[in-house]
Amino acid sequence: MKLVTWNTQSCTGLDGRVSPQRIVDGALALADFDVLCLQEISDDGPGADQAADIAQRLPGFRVFFGAAQDSFEDGRRRRFGNLVATRLPVARLQHHPLPFPADAGTESTPRMCTVVTVLDPRLGPVRVMTTHLEFYSQRQRLAQARALRALHLEYFDQARSPPRDARQLATEAILCGDFNSPPGSEAYAAVAETSERSTLRDAWPLVHGDRPQPPTFCVHEQRYLPQPVAFDFFFVTDGLKDHVRRIDVDGASRASDHQPVALELGPGAGGAGPGTL
């Protein structure tokens, strides 16, 4: 299974040009992906439906858009959120709002997590979760990170102790997106906190060891931060960690103010898939 995650900044490049086609092309250049996870996708009225635009550019893929923000201004509906596109069979789809605690005087916006359970022919059911955490409010960002881990464990428990007649529930998951938190931060640690049930592990060191992940934000311009940082990650569960084969960052792209990240998983040494129901 090959995946790409990318915060697209509404498909706006550093040159100011809006181009969903450039996002699709850049993601495909990084990996012949089975699953594409995009953040900051806009649906802003007639002629500006980026989810529909991207769907047209990915024949053979099913595209799912989840709005973290859904509002009306001057009679026009404005939506902004996450997108998951996949050519794999899909078992389940859910959108989850993340916590949005009050933080007076701080600029912030609602956030959410899109969850798509795909059926990989070798790995079986895998739950793909993509998200975009708050940038300005540390309080909200930490609450959202903790909620993501709790959400994963809830799904895990459901798969281990399924409701009657439940089918194709996945114990194993891939969590990706823009966490607006570098390695070692409190929010990052909250996502990756060890659990006896199921731990979400940063995929980068599984391949590259102690080599730090290259920065994924403010690489080519420092508009928001004084120096480049790694904010965009893939996390995998215990049953998938031995299947991680490749993870790379495209540091050259200027199609967004973030850099895309690719992850590839394959069969383990024994050829068997992870534990699933």
Image: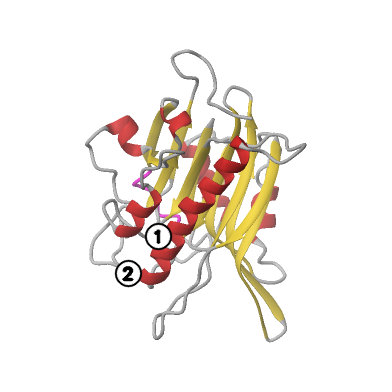
Q: 158 or 98: which is nearer to us?
A: 158
Residue 216 seen anywhere in this rendered image of the structure: no
Which image quadrant: the C terminus? Answer: top right
Q: Which residue extends farthest right?
A: 165
| Residue 109: x %, y % from top left | 50, 73
Residue bearing the label numbered 1:
257
Residue bearing the label numbered 2:
224
The disc labelled 2 sits on which kind of residue? Tyr
First in sequence: mark 2 vs mark 1 = 2
When asked about the image quadrant of residue 95, the answer is bottom right
| Residue 17: x %, y % from top left | 50, 64
Q: 186 or 87: which is nearer to us?
A: 186
Q: Residue at x 37, y 47 (%)?
A: 192
Query: Of helix, strand and loop, which one carries label 1?
Result: loop
> Could you tell me if the residues under marks 2 and 1 are in contact, i.e. CB atoms within 8 Å?
yes
The secondary structure that dominates the magenta segment is loop
Span of residues in magenta: 250-256
Query: Of helix, strand and loop, which one carries label 2?
Result: loop
